[in-house]
Image (spheres, grey):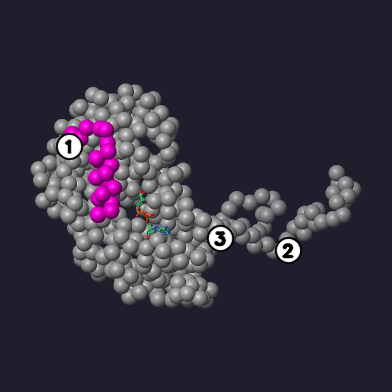
């Protein structure tokens, strides 16, 4: 047995011992997880700065506090989520207890990625612990500082027989995936997701896939241009565009494009000054490899760069960049950009915008900006995406009572709050019967003669 196998077996035998099942155990581990985040807040801020030059505010908001928020929500609802859910009955089951029991699945593997290296690993873990599972965390090897900190802290705060961190890249993850898990939650790219599914198929392991895609921001009709620009710029350039729910491209009429461009420039200057490279509130690209990929895209686009475009390889810096006159088949409209480059494409009607969105893979999020609420409703009803938000972006994922997950090519399954608890629970159909109504029950026994049945 290799060492990964030994870790999985250690957790499996802890799970079999039943230690994780009680509400008291789950609650205590969730509280410990909260302490880990609160007591080491500064260490996480430093690690996230090393990995992505994340500004302190962004690190707290999108990595630490979002998880603490979900922990509060989960801890206060845990007891009610764990209760049996009684269901509607019929005449034949009138005297029975019929309910859904939520059972933990066993040993769960959570594979994270580098853009929110803390949030995307620990937030799913909240649901897995709440549901009574043992968990192995596999952080991203790209965000090394946060990866090492998580590996150091988790064993100090959580029960060591039930929770473990295994670090490593593609080869290590492939070796780990040879083991049997009871659920795998993977966050990352679509290509790697295919090999995760293949590995899971060997053991018939259920999988949740949290993938990406190109999230459109469709601006239509009358709209508050200043507010729209500020909200769009904030969401697009937060974490230097390295957010799976960042608006990937903007769709609007030529008139709106011409009106919003000065407002975008103004918002960029207000947020990041005239020299974003010197601004402490603007992040860097995670690695040279990712920086090169983005700069190659920018080099190949046939669109016109109207804002930004400057870069510095040594610093892994790319300025907030806006590109117009982008064709539908431009390099910027191929794969997800995942960086601080905003292409603007024009469409001249609501139907044209909707048709454009529907001609592409279903995105993880879709944003519709308009003063016209019926237009927003039309976009919402005629399209499909993991999440939807009007007149803002990203912010919908901060509410723990909404599910977070994709659809189609952006993934399947979801988590956050109760949805995480459900993802990592088995819904067991339970019917507790006594000996009543035997005369009615005996109708089902052979011999099935018409005479006996009275037909
Ligand atoms: P990635 O798929 O390369 O890496 C993610 C994880 O998979 C890492 O832990 C890595 O070690 C592991 N991995 C890499 N290659 C592997 C292999 N061959 N076999 C097994 N495991 C392997 O993803 P990435 O490029 O780091 O992430 C970018 C993508 O993730 C974007 O598409 C983005 O939209 C998406 N994303 C989605 C969400 C979401 O919540 N839906 C969040 C963040 C990022």
Separation (CA) of disc 3 from disc 1:
49 Å
State whether residue 41 is above or below residue 341: below
Q: Mark 1 highlights which residue? A: 307
In the image, 378 versus 198, the foreground residue is 198
Mark linked to residue 202: 3
Q: Is residue 293 left or right of residue 27?
A: left
Q: Residues within 10 Å of mark 2 (few under 14, many from 20)?
A: few
Q: Which of the 4 image quadrants contains residue 144?
A: bottom left
Residue at 88 percent of width and 47 percent of height: 450
First along the sequence among labels 2 and 3: 3
Cβ–Cβ under 8 Å for marks 2 and 3: no
Q: Position of residue 313 (x, y in %)?
A: 19, 51
**What span is in magenta?**
288-306
Q: CA distance from mark 2 to mark 3?
A: 43 Å
Q: Residue 158 has which mark?
A: none
Q: Residues within 10 Å of mark 3 (few under 14, many from 20)?
A: few
Q: Which residue is more in the foreground, 302 or 144?
A: 302
Closer to the camera in the image, 326 or 238: 326
Q: Which secondary structure lies at badge 2? A: loop
Q: Position of residue 2 (x, y in %)?
A: 47, 74
Q: Which residue is mark 2?
A: 435
């Amino acid at each position: 047995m290799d060492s990964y196998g030994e870790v999985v077996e250690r957790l499996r035998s802890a799970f079999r011992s039943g230690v994780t099942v009680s509400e008291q155990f789950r609650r205590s581990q969730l509280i410990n997880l909260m302490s880990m985040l609160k007591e080491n807040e500064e260490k996480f801020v430093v690690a996230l700065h090393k990995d992505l030059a994340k500004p302190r505010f962004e690190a707290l908001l999108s990595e630490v506090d979002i998880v603490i928020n979900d922990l509060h929500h989960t801890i206060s609802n845990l007891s009610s989520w764990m209760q049996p859910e009684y269901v509607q009955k019929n005449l034949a089951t009138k005297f029975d207890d019929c309910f859904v029991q939520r059972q933990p699945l066993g040993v769960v593997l959570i594979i994270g990625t580098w853009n929110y290296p803390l949030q995307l690993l620990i937030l799913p873990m909240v649901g897995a612990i709440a549901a009574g599972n043992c968990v192995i965390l596999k952080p991203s090897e790209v965000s090394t500082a946060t990866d090492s900190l998580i590996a150091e802290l988790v064993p100090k705060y959580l029960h060591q027989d039930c929770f473990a961190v295994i670090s490593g890249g593609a080869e290590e993850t492939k070796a780990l995936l040879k083991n049997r898990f009871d659920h795998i939650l993977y966050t990352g790219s679509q290509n790697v997701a295919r090999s995760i599914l293949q590995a899971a198929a060997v053991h018939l392991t259920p999988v949740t896939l949290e993938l990406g895609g190109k999230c459109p921001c469709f601006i239509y009709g009358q709209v508050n241009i200043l507010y729209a620009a500020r909200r769009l710029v904030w969401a697009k350039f937060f974490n230097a565009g390295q957010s799976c729910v960042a608006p990937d491209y903007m769709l609007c009429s030529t008139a709106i494009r011409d009106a919003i461009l000065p407002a975008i420039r103004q918002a960029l200057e207000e947020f990041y000054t005239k020299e974003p490279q010197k601004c402490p509130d603007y992040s860097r690209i995670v690695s040279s490899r990712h920086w090169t990929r983005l700069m190659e895209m920018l080099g190949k686009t046939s669109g016109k760069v109207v804002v930004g475009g400057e870069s510095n390889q040594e610093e892994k810096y790319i300025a907030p960049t806006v590109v117009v006159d982008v064709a539908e088949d431009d390099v910027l409209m191929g794969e997800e950009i995942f960086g601080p480059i905003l292409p603007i494409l024009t469409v001249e009607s609501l139907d044209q915008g909707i048709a454009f969105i529907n001609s592409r893979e279903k995105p993880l999020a879709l944003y519709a900006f308009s003063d016209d609420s019926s237009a927003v409703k039309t976009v919402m009803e005629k399209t499909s995406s993991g999440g939807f938000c009007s007149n803002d972006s990203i912010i919908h994922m901060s509410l723990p009572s909404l599910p977070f997950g994709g659809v189609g090519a952006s993934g399947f399954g979801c988590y956050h709050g109760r949805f995480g608890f459900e993802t990592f629970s088995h819904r067991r159909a339970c019917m507790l019967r006594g000996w009543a109504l035997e005369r009615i029950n005996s109708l089902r026994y052979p011999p099935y003669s018409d005479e006996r049945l009275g037909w």
